Image (cartoon, helix red, strand yellow):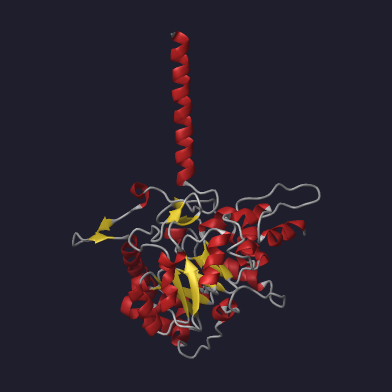
Amino acid sequence: ARMVCLRTCAFVLLVAGFTTAFVQVQWSSPIGGALRRPPALSCRQSRNSAGLRMGILDDVVERKKKEVEALKANPPPGVAELLEKMGSIKNKNAVYKALKKPKGTITVIPEMKWKTPLLGKFCERPQPDILGGHYYESGAAAVCVHVDGEGYGFTHDDLRIVVKGQQSHQGNFPGPLPCIAYDTFIDPIQVAVAAEAGAKGVMLNVAALKERTKEMIDACDGLGMDCIVEVHSEEEVKIAVDAGAKIIGVCNRNQHTFEYISELDTVAREWAVPIEETIYNLHELIPDGTIKLAMGNVNETLMAWKLRDYGYGSIMIGETLMRGSEMRMASGPYQAAYNEAKGLIRAFKSKGSVKYGPASTASFYGKGEGAKETLGHIAM
């Protein structure tokens, strides 16, 4: 009886251990945080002075209003001069040209951030110049640097470092990657700050700007900056199109909770419904000639290829590549360590077939289409 009791206790402890490990795996993705945390841990809302419920974006906008007041009271060096020249600065459309590619191809914009308002810190803080170098070597089209230090970790100082690193490729082929500043922009002075730091473009969120979207697009153009206009609904797509947006990013995030709008099948590691039923079907409302960009929860090779075949010309990827940049293949006497983010970007860009391609990022491990791009780079 004592032996049976001991065996029973051991079995219970073993099951408990496996259960804990399984839950931990389900809460954190090995590649880019594709698996979501439970809503109880991630949904963060507050109340404003009137007692109304506020979402994460509302909190951020209120914080940005205070930042704008501080900037106007004490503009950083060079910002006031840029604002005085607004309207006379030629926009060279560096970001638009970098993303505009023939039909049937897709470009990748890696993001630089090491925490989010939803997840908090999700990876170690990398050196921005080294990370920017990895993205250049992988064949990215542009680099998107989050400059909201409180929300995403990096700042305008990091943006300057990345810009300087890209400028070292001047005269090479390919040349320097254009840098995009990611923030919640609500006033032209924020755009001027990003331009002074060296950015060639910014992100504009229609959910935050609403009817002021066209005003901010015009301000960006007047400061010589491209803008990617982020949308999350049919109404917002209409606002962006009517405002004359040249690059529209369809974002798979609820702006109140920052959770995904279109759910992910954590087993198949793609959307839980056909792509035609996801948020990405909004691309049908975007006119031809406008660059269509997919954002949010794109973290697998097959997902990128499906978006390409569905009509998207570019994808923006954050957590997947930030986590991937931490991973290295073991180095040896004849081979340097290989950065996983490079392999992922090359696989996303490869002209693979959705029908015959892998159902996961197997290309990184040498299986399926897209493998030759990754393994060829490792061999070199």
Front residue of 115/103: it is: 103
In this view of the protein, can residue 117 be seen by the observer?
yes
Q: Which quadrant does the C terminus fall into?
A: bottom right
Tell me where residue 235 appears, x and y as whole percent: 33, 75
Numbered label tally: 0
Seen from this angle, which residue lies furthest right?
334
Residue at point 66% right, 61% down? 370
Instruction: Please tell me whether residue 114 is drawn above or below residue 207 in the rendered image.
Output: above
Tell me where residue 47 appears, x and y as whole percent: 24, 58
Dividing the picture into quadrants, the one containing residue 277 is bottom left
Tell me where residue 221 appears, x and y as whole percent: 47, 85
376 displayed left or right of 128: right
Seen from this angle, which residue lies furthest top?
1
Q: Which quadrant does the N terminus fall into?
A: top left
Seen from this angle, which residue lies furthest front?
355
Front residue of 64/105: it is: 105
Residue at point 55% right, 58% down? 300
Tell me where residue 343 appears, x and y as whole percent: 65, 59
334 displayed left or right of 6: right
242 displayed left or right of 99: left
Instruction: Please tell me whether residue 334 is drawn above or below residue 313 in the rendered image.
Output: above
In this view of the protein, can residue 325 be seen by the observer?
no
Seen from this angle, which residue lies furthest bottom?
88
256 displayed left or right of 7: left
